[in-house]
Image (spheres, rainbow, N blue to C red):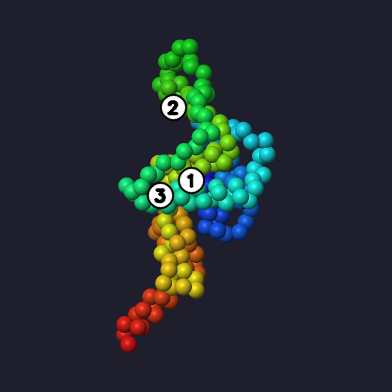
Amino acid sequence: MAAPKRLQLLLPWLNGDHGSPGMKLNWFLAESVQAWGDSTQFSHSDDRGFGFAQAELDDLRRVLLEILDMAEQTGEGRPWRRLESLEFGVIRQREKPAKLPRGASERREALKPGAFGLAVFGNLLDILVYAFMRTLTEPGTVLLSRCPAPAPGDWSRICGRYLISGGRVGRPQEYCSDACRVRTNRRNEAEANKRRS
């Protein structure tokens, strides 16, 4: 699954919509691991699976939103996040051929990247933060932006919900919902009418 699809699993929860965050986190991690193929193997030290307490979910959501906020401030601040429980290793995923094949296609197959992979072990919450940051930094995948529409009920503020504005063919998405697009059009019409009168 491409990074935009993986992030779409999490964005409603990150934007404060109700739902099943544990299930979304489970899908996100599972899809992230599949997307990176066999090049990354995750294992965690928690026996409870994805049975997070509400306080842990709130803390994880706060951390992921901080990461997104820091990412918006290019060149400012300190974009570091310490994940103390994580341990990394390198694992061989393909056996080294005793002798390189003579044929061109067999030789390319034997020499292609991916003979080694990354192994990550640690606390499940830290692994989720790492997977989230890795998804955001995959080459050529997504552009996240904030919805510029007026906020519901208070047009002096912006909506500010995160949305995926890249990663698909055609015009990038500008608003998080049709309601925000309509609210923007109404505000623009009201401002134009005010200027005319």
Gap between marks 1 and 3, in whole Å? 19 Å
- Going by the numbered disc 2, the residue's amino acid type is Pro
> Could you tell me which residue is drawn at 64 percent across and 46 percent down?
52
- Going by the numbered disc 3, the residue's amino acid type is Met
Residue 24: tell me if it is visible.
no
- Outermost residue, top side: 98
Q: Going by the image, does 113 lie left or right of 13?
A: left
Depth check, mark 3 against mark 2: the one in front is: 3
- Going by the numbered disc 1, the residue's amino acid type is Ala
Task: In this rendered view, identify the residue nearer to me: 37 or 170.
Answer: 37
Depth check, mark 2 against mark 1: the one in front is: 1
Gap between marks 2 and 1, in whole Å? 21 Å
The tag on residue 113 is 2
Indicate the position of residue 135 as horizontal and vertical percent values: 47, 43
SS class, disc 1 = helix
Give the position of the C terminus as an image quadrant. Answer: bottom left
**Contact (CB < 8 A) between labels 3 and 2?**
no
The tag on residue 178 is none
Task: In this rendered view, identify the residue nearer to me: 164 or 61.
Answer: 61
> Could you tell me which residue is drawn at 51 percent across and 22 percent down?
92
Looking at the picture, does residue 97 appear above or below residue 7? above
**Contact (CB < 8 A) between labels 1 and 3?**
no
- Whichever of callouts 1 and 3 sits on the residue coming sooner in the sequence is 1
Residue 126: tell me if it is visible.
yes
Depth check, mark 1 against mark 3: the one in front is: 3
**Label 1 Cα crowd, 10 Å radius (few <14 / some 14-19 / many 20+):** many
> Could you tell me which residue is drawn at 43 percent across and 25 percent down?
112
Indicate the position of residue 71 as horizontal and vertical percent values: 40, 49
The tag on residue 3 is 1
**Label 3 Cα crowd, 10 Å radius (few <14 / some 14-19 / many 20+):** some
Q: Quadrant of residue 79?
A: top left
